[in-house]
Structure formats: C-alpha cells, structure tokens
C-alpha cells in the first residue's frame, strides 16, 4: 500500500512538472518575442521624441555658414556665444519679467472674478441658476482659437492693443469657464461633505490665497479649501482656518484703513495696530512710529496696554 502511494505521488509530481514545463516551453518564445517588440516600439518613440531636441541643441552651437553648408552636421567648434547673442538680441530677461507679470495679474483677476460667481452659483438659490451655470461653463467646450477674432476686435476697440494689459485681459477671461466649474464644484462638495453652510472667505484669507505660489496647482488649492472648511467654526473662512504655510503668505505688516476714515481716527488705527503688533510693548511701538511714549498715550487716551 505504501509503495502504491509513493508511486502515485511520483507520477503526479512528474505529470505536474511535465505540464508546467510544457506550458512554459510553449509560452516562453511568444512571451520574449512580444516583450522585444514592445521595447523596440517604445525605444523608437523615445528616439523620435529626442531626435528633434538633440538636433536643435547641436544646431544652436554651429555658425550660420556651417548650417548653410551642412544642415545636419556637427559643429567644428561649439559656439557657446550664440546663447549670449540670442539673450541680448531678443531681450529675453525683459520678456521673462513680462511673462511673470502677465501670469500673476491674470491669475489674480481670474480668481477674483470667478470666485464671486462660483459663490453665488453654489450657495444662492434663484430661478435660472442651473441655466446660468451651464451657460458660463459651456465655454469649456469651445476651442480657444474660436475666441481669437472676438478678442482681437475687443482689444483694438478698447485701444489697448500691443500692451501687457491686453494679454492679462485675454488670459484671465479665456479661463473663466473652467475656473467657475472648478471653484463651484469645490464649494458644493466641501460644504456637503462637512455639513457646513460656508458663506464665503474674508479679505485677509483671500489675500493669503492670492499671495501663495500654489506649486501643487489645483490639487493643492483643493486640499487647502477642504481643510479650511473643516477647520472653520463659523460660516466664514478666515486666515486662521488656512494651513500655516499659506496663512504666513498673507499681507501681515500692513494696516487696512477704510476709505472715508478721518485723519484723527486713521492715526489712532495706526498707533493701535502698531502697539498690537508689538504685543503691547509701548516703547518699541513708539520707536517704530517715531514718536515719544507720552505722545502715544496722548493720542490714545484711556489706552491701558501692558508692556
């Protein structure tokens, strides 16, 4: 009986090993062949993508005469001075600064306009709200090139053609549909998920959002707003509800004085905010303001701060 069991086990082991070996022998050639074809295709695509960049780099180091004689040749001596000439002739530093200015102001204007529209569309209930939302966001489906002629006509009629202001208007307006779509969706989602009726963002929190660089793009903005909705205790998001890294980008060190404030009251606001920023240190606040400590007390009668 034991011999039969041992024979059966041996036969089963041999059968299984033979089956596995046979299946591997049948699959190995096709597996390696398919894998080789895949890598050949990927390497071909990589070379096709790199070749123009390599040719551009090599050509940038050649003289004009070399390019005319042999467009696909190698430079006899690399002409690194070509880059210096290109920077000076094209005035690239100025163009770089212009790009930064246009990007910063266009994004700020776009966020300012679309956040107001998104707040109304996500929080207010009125007839035609869905139709208005559909109309505003339908611009995502229209190719940007289709707006070029209307934009050009508008810019020329406003007499701002060939100016940075024209670029700012175009870049800010062309992204309005997608911005309204994203911000409205964020506000609706965060309010529903956290069961809070968020009515908006105060001025200081808004300045923090404008001042931050947003290296994480839309995902980081989404996480920031979601965190603020969770942290806030009221219906209005303040700068205290924002993450520390974004909160520190606010306009701290500035004093806001409403239009119409009298000179006397404005002076009191400046003194009071300066003393508050120095945590009640009257002597340090007086030194910053350039006045004496007695003058500080005289201009703020009844003030009872402690050093």
Image: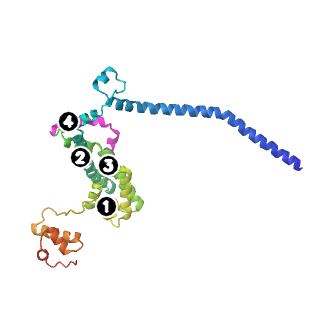
**Front-most of 221 and 299?**
299
Mark 3 vs mark 1, foreground winner is 1
Give the residue furthest to the left.
263
Mark 4 or mark 1, whichever is nearer to me: 1
* Secondary structure beneath label 3: helix
Q: Nearer the viewer, residue 298 or 229?
A: 298
- Please, which colouring scheme is shown? rainbow
Give the secondary structure at mark 4: helix
| Mark 3–mark 4 distance (CA, rounded to whole Å) | 25 Å
Q: Which is nearer the N-term, disc 3 or disc 2?
A: 2
Which disc, if any, is residue 101? 2
Counting from the top left corner in percent of width and height, residue 307 is at 22, 77
Name the residue tied to disc 1: 247
Q: For mark 3, what is the residue?
A: 180
Kindly tell me whether residue 238 is visible in this rendering.
no
Q: Position of residue 6 (x, y in %)?
A: 84, 47
- Give the Cα separation between the discs numbered 3 and 2: 23 Å
Which numbered disc covers residue 153? 4
Q: Name the image quarter holding residue 29.
A: top right
């Amino acid at each position: 009986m034991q011999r039969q069991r041992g024979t059966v086990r041996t036969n089963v082991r041999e059968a299984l090993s033979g089956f596995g070996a046979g299946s591997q022998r049948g699959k190995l050639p096709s597996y390696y062949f398919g894998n080789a074809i895949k890598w050949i295709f990927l390497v071909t695509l990589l070379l096709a993508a790199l070749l123009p960049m390599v040719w551009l780099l090599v050509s940038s180091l050649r003289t004009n005469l070399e390019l005319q004689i042999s467009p696909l040749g190698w430079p006899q001596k690399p002409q690194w001075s070509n880059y210096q000439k290109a920077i000076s002739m094209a005035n690239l530093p100025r163009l770089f600064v212009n790009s930064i200015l246009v990007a910063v102001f266009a994004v700020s204007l776009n966020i300012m306009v679309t956040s107001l529209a998104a707040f109304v569309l996500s929080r207010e209930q009125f007839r035609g709200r869905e139709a208005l939302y559909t109309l505003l966001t339908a611009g995502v489906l229209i190719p940007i090139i289709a707006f070029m002629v209307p934009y050009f006509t508008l810019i020329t009629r406003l007499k701002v053609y060939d100016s940075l202001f024209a670029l700012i208007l175009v870049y800010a307006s062309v992204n309005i549909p997608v911005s309204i779509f994203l911000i409205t969706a964020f506000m609706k989602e965060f309010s529903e998920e956290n069961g809070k009726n968020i009515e908006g963002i105060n001025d200081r929190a808004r300045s923090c959002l404008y001042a931050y660089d947003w290296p994480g793009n839309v995902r980081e903005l989404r996480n920031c707003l979601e965190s603020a909705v969770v942290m806030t205790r009221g219906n209005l998001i303040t700068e205290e509800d924002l993450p520390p890294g974004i909160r520190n980008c606010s306009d701290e060190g500035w004093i806001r004085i409403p239009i119409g404030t009298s000179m006397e009251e404005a002076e009191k606001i400046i003194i009071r905010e300066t003393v508050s920023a120095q945590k009640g240190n009257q002597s340090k606040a007086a030194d910053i303001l350039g006045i004496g400590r007695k003058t500080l007390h005289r201009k703020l009668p009844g003030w009872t701060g402690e050093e």
